[in-house]
Image: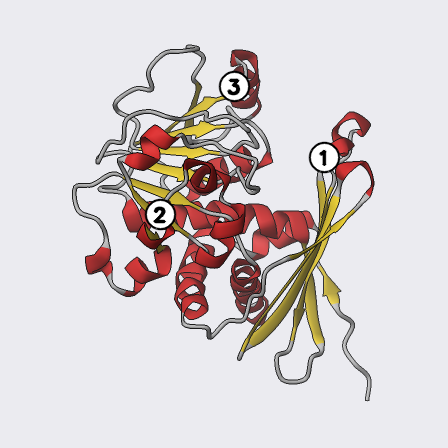
Amino acid sequence: MTRPITQIFDAAATARLIPYAALVDALKRASIEYAQQRIASPERLVVPLNEGGIMLSMPATAPDLAIHKLVNVCPANGPHGLPTIHGKVMTFDADTGETLFILDGPIVTGRRTAAISMLGVETFAAAAPREFLLIGTGTQALNHLEAIGELFPEARVWVKGSAPARAEAFCARHHDKALEVRPFTQDGAAIPESVDVVIALTTSRQPIYDEAARAERLVIGVGAFTPAMVEIGARTLAGSALFVDDEAGARHEAGDFIQAGVDWAQVGGIASVLDNPALRPQKKPVVFKSVGCAAWDLAACRVAREALSGA
């Protein structure tokens, strides 16, 4: 019997297969299933590479699908003009183990990470956001800008970089998008009160947002993924209800929470609120921290499978 050739999708094709709206819905389902242990997603295996790089092995299985994401993260690639992240996400039949298709790893990672932030907005924001502030000007900032453009096209987006010139350059590169994008270049100035959602997207080792917690402003931390990294300061955390995407992973990777010495018994998982919206904090500031896990990659592969089945 002749087996069909496994389809391998490049970055552009992978992006087309996993639009943000469908991805947010898939992540909502996957978050609940993961919390209920209906998706198995063990802690990622990390293996060192040269020049401070790492190889990440991230499998996940569910009754309907199995996936394995293998990506290499090489911070030293920048001076060589190479992307920091390379890799693939392989998708398998959960019954036979046969390979179904292969997606581009960086695109899956970037889009499902931004979609988890958008799920956080949908879950915790007091109202539909009118203004976002993205702190960071890298690939994840672009992913989040694209997600906001698809899901909140009427919103205004401010962008703050490590230097004003970085924010200006980022906004200039993406000015052709229908979304209103503006650089925030006033060093030391207070963030406009009109900003509803702040999303931190850096690998900083010092707090880059530490304002007093505000009930009308949702704060989302994305970039800090090791105990040594921190984006959200203790002042903001102390006055907020704290939630994470992956409770097990956050205890080892959420540097913001780890360095602030938070009481983990007071940290909730987003799945608890998705499963019971009555648990959403009312009139209280919220900080949502995401660290990611392979269950979210499985959700992306579900979206791609659905798109392919209808093609």
Give, as a three-letter code, the residue at label 2: Asp
Q: Amino acid at mark 1?
A: Pro
Distance in Å between CA atoms under marks 1 and 3: 21 Å
Q: Earlier in the sequence, mark 1 or mark 3?
A: 1
In this picture, residue 125 sits left or right of residue 227: left
In the rendered view of the protein, which quadrant contains the N terminus? bottom right
Location of mark 3 (residue):
167
Point 23% across, 41% down: residue:
127
Crowding around mark 1 (Cα neighbors within 10 Å: few <14, some 14 to 19, many 20+) is some
Mark whose residue sits in front, 3 or 2: 2
Q: Is residue 91 above or below residue 238?
A: below
Q: Residue 35: percent from the left, percent from the top?
A: 41, 67
What type is the residue that disc 3 sits on? Answer: Ala
- In the rendering, at what x and y percent does residue 98 appear? 71, 78
In front of the other: 287 or 233:
233
| Helix, strand or loop under label 3 | helix
Residue in view at x 26 percent, y 41 percent: 128
User: Are discs 1 and 2 less than 8 Å apart at CB?
Assistant: no
Task: Provide residue 2's location: percent of width, then percent of height.
Answer: 82, 84
- Rounded to the nearest angstrom, the CA distance separating label 1 from label 2 is 32 Å
- Name above or below for residue 119 compared with residue 153: below
Say which label, 1 or 2, has the lower sequence index: 1
Q: CA distance from mark 3 to mark 2?
A: 35 Å
Question: On the image, numbered disc 2 is attached to which residue?
Answer: 263
Label 1 sits on residue: 75
Residue occupying the far bottom of the picture: 1
Q: Is residue 219 left or right of residue 95?
A: left
Coloration mode: secondary structure
